[in-house]
């Protein structure tokens, strides 16, 4: 069983890609699954994240606040602005633009820590940034979405705030509590968590892609290009700003990956819950879930070649 779980987590990018293609070509059976299931799937991923966290993981927040502050400022400025700029540049309709902006306004993705580890980046900084950006998300994600997309669509900040609490923050807290109270159980579960998260993310992608398969087939290439550019530009901008600030190589890698990889599952979930009148708003999150696993694997290999010592 452990070998199977390792296989699933190691080949996450390929699995998600295959699942997306299947959902695109054979969407009918998957359309029977209610979209609200996405919330539970994301809750499972966040609960798994909570099970892996230690209070020690947040020591970096207090021991190296400058690095965390730099990373989080970039996280919640570069990606939202890039999303808005690309939406305008490619003249996306309101629904697709909203979906791209939702992705840009979400916190760092859970896969970023794994990619940072493989890239030989600063793992403590990556974990700290993911944790802090996730805790800030209930406030900043609704606010930034309202600021950048509220002109064209109705953004209910209070409802989005509560959704992020229920779907993200509470499951993480529950996971941390369970780890504290049941350490033996948690230790046994650790080997299976990456595979469980991979399967949950794969399910989210399949449900969203299947629900919008026809529209994707008709006009999906532009939004695919936008998603690719959003991710690649985020990775590049994060790295070059880190370089301009003369941060060490491991820190630059961590910030680049944290900035470039978003919690796209959360973006899809928010689109389903709060913007059901704009079905295409779920598409950017689903596409990003597929693409960032591919780009993450490539970036990890490129960054791993640069093993300059940390400062």
Image: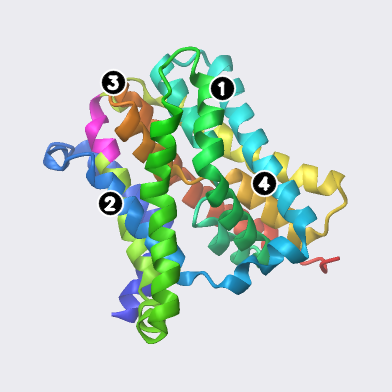
Q: Earlier in the sequence, mark 3 or mark 4?
A: 4
Residue 212 forms part of the magenta stretch: yes
* Rendered residue at 68%/68% (across/down): 59
Q: Residues within 10 Å of mark 1 (few under 14, many from 20)?
A: few
Q: Residues within 10 Å of mark 3 (few under 14, many from 20)?
A: few
According to the picture, the residue beneath numbered tag 4 turns out to be 72
Q: Earlier in the sequence, mark 4 or mark 1?
A: 4
> On the rendered image, what quadrant is the C terminus found in?
bottom right
Question: Which of 88/124 is in front?
Answer: 124
Quarter residue 179 falls in: bottom left
Q: Residues within 10 Å of mark 4 (few under 14, many from 20)?
A: many
The answer to whether the residues at label 3 and label 4 have Cβ atoms under 8 Å apart is no
According to the picture, the residue beneath numbered tag 3 turns out to be 277
Which residue is the extreme one toward the bottom? Answer: 184
Q: Earlier in the sequence, mark 2 or mark 1?
A: 2
Specify start and end residues of the magenta stretch as a single range. 208-214
- Label drawn at residue 147: 1
Magenta-highlighted stretch: main secondary structure?
helix
According to the picture, the residue beneath numbered tag 2 turns out to be 40
Mark 2 and mark 1: Cα distance apart in space: 28 Å
Q: Position of residue 229 (x, y in %)?
A: 57, 32
Q: Position of residue 250 (x, y in %)?
A: 75, 62
* Rendered residue at 50%/47% (across/down): 292
Would residue 122 be seen by someone viewing this image from the given angle? no
Q: Earlier in the sequence, mark 3 or mark 2?
A: 2
């Amino acid at each position: 069983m452990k070998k199977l779980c390792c296989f699933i987590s190691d080949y996450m990018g390929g699995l998600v890609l295959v699942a997306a293609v299947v959902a695109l070509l054979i969407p009918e059976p998957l359309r029977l699954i209610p979209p609200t299931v996405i919330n539970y799937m994301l809750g499972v991923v966040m609960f798994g994240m909570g099970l892996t966290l230690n209070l020690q993981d947040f020591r970096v927040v207090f021991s190296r606040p400058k690095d965390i502050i730099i990373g989080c400022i970039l996280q919640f400025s570069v990606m939202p602005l890039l999303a808005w700029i690309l939406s305008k540049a490619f003249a996306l309709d309101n629904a697709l633009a909203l979906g791209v902006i939702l992705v840009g306004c979400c916190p760092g993705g859970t896969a970023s820590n794994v990619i940072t580890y493989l890239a030989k980046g600063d793992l403590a900084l990556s974990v700290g940034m993911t944790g802090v950006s996730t805790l800030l998300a209930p406030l900043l994600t609704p606010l930034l979405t309202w600021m950048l997309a509220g002109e064209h669509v109705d953004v209910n900040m209070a409802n989005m705030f509560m959704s992020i609490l229920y779907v993200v923050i509470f499951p993480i807290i529950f996971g941390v509590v369970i780890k504290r109270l049941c350490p033996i159980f948690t230790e046994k579960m650790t080997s299976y968590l990456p595979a469980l998260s991979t399967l949950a993310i794969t399910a989210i992608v399949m449900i969203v892609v299947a629900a919008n398969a026809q529209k994707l087939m008709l006009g999906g290439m532009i939004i695919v290009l936008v998603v690719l550019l959003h991710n690649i530009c985020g990775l590049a901008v994060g790295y070059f700003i880190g370089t301009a600030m003369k941060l060490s190589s491991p820190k630059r890698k961590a910030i680049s990956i944290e900035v470039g990889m978003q919690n796209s599952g959360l973006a899809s979930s928010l689109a389903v819950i709060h913007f059901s009148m704009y079905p295409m708003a779920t598409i950017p999150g689903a596409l990003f879930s597929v693409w960032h696993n591919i780009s993450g694997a490539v970036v990890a290999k490129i960054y791993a070649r640069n093993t300059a010592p940390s400062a």
